[in-house]
Amino acid sequence: MLVDVFRLRRAGEKLSEADFLVSPPVRGYLCSWSFAGGYRAGTPLRVQAVTLTACGRASGAALLPPLHNFRVVRFNGGGLILAGDEEVEVRRRHSEVYRQAWFCRPVSPRESG
């Protein structure tokens, strides 16, 4: 699905209304997948993830860091909000995990053309 994504957090902190209003959206295709995420109490875990790519395939180059363990927080005619964990590389071979939320607004065919 082609969407405009507005990020709602920066480094885990909710954006102010002023920051949100000046942040441009990122346009791309939502792609989701799941993978084995290790074990907890002897039970295998599945990790759900969603990313945004230019090509519409999860294997494509990500336009935003993927959201892991995401869930749909809100869904209405204007779009949907996805929330999850975002892993950001801060130094070589060292990453930080932050809470992140995306507002995803579907792009109409006349807007995409």
Image (cartoon, rainbow, N blue to C red):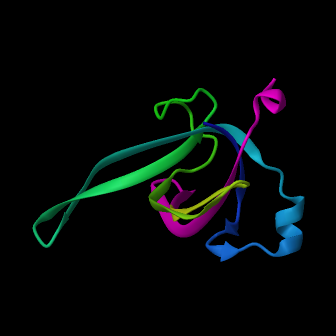
Residue at 82% in and 65% down: 20
Name the spot of residue 113 as percent of width and height, x first. 81, 23
Residue 112 percent across, percent down from the top left: 78, 29
Residue 103 quadrant: bottom right
Q: Is residue 103 left or right of residue 99?
A: right
The single residue placed furthest to the top in the displayed view is 113
Dividing the image into 4 quarters, which one contains the N terminus? top right
Image coords of residue 78 (percent x, y) = 73, 54
Q: Is residue 15 left or right of residue 19?
A: left
Up/down of 113 relative to 35, above or below = above
Range drawn in magenta:
86-113
For the point 39% across and 43% down, which residue is it?
33
Q: Viewed as shown, does residue 35 lie left or right of 48?
A: left
Q: Is residue 5 above or below residue 83?
A: above
* Quadrant position of residue 12: bottom right
The x, y position of residue 42, in whole percent, is 10, 67
